[in-house]
Image: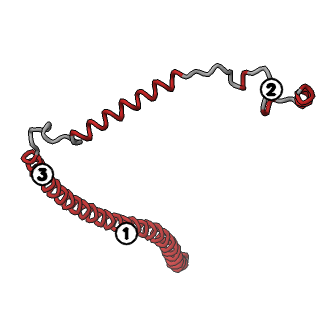
Amino acid sequence: MTEPMTEPMTITMIIIAGLIIFTIGGIIGFLVNQFLSSSSREQRKLIEQVNKSEAALTQYKSSVNNHLANSASLLEQMNATCQTTMKQMKESTQLLKDEITTDVDGMPFFSQETQQQLAQTAALRHQTRMSDNVEMTTEAPLDYSGQASGLFIDENEKQRNSSAD
């Protein structure tokens, strides 16, 4: 009789063992799913950041290319302007060389009469300066006189000076 009893127990034990294994498997599956899904989310975020960075880099490259193209165009314009200016300067220099006469004495700055008048005026001014230097003053300036004057007069000296006069 022990045999028939062991059989239902074994079935119950198998069922309980199956339920325990199923529960443990479910818990492990849930934990693995959570772990994998969080790493999957991180990977998606990283991939999204990489895509944004690549888009920003592409935009930056495009901007740099446009800037360099504009700079090259402006430099070409500056070069053309410089070439035109140099050409005009050469032409102007050549025109000036052609127009300048070699006889500078033939075209004085002042006429002969004006130069003579200026020479006479300079001689008169020189004589006037010489006569001004001859006159000498023998009187000492008031700063060096024996009496106090101006702001340096003491109140007592004012009274003495006024009583002495």
Q: Which residue is nearer to you in this view: 66 or 76?
A: 76
Task: Please name the residue that numbered disc 1 is placed on.
Answer: 48
Q: Label 2 is placed on what type of residue? A: Ala
Q: Label 1 is placed on what type of residue? A: Glu
Residue drawn 21% across the image and 39% down it: 112
Query: Badge 3, how many Cα within 10 Å: few under 14, some, many 20+?
Result: few
Cα separation, mark 1 vs mark 2, equals: 97 Å
* Sequence-wise first label, 1 or 3: 1
Q: Label 3 is placed on what type of residue? A: Ser
The label on residue 148 is 2
Residue drawn 80% across the image and 26% down it: 148
Task: Please name the residue that numbered disc 3 is placed on.
Answer: 92
Residue drawn 15% across the image and 42% down it: 107
Give the farthest residue toward the left.
98
Q: Residue 162 placed where, x, y %?
A: 89, 30
* Quadrant position of residue 32: bottom left
Residue drawn 45% across the image and 71% down it: 33
Q: Quadrant of the C terminus?
A: top right
Q: Residue 67 placed where, x, y %?
A: 26, 62
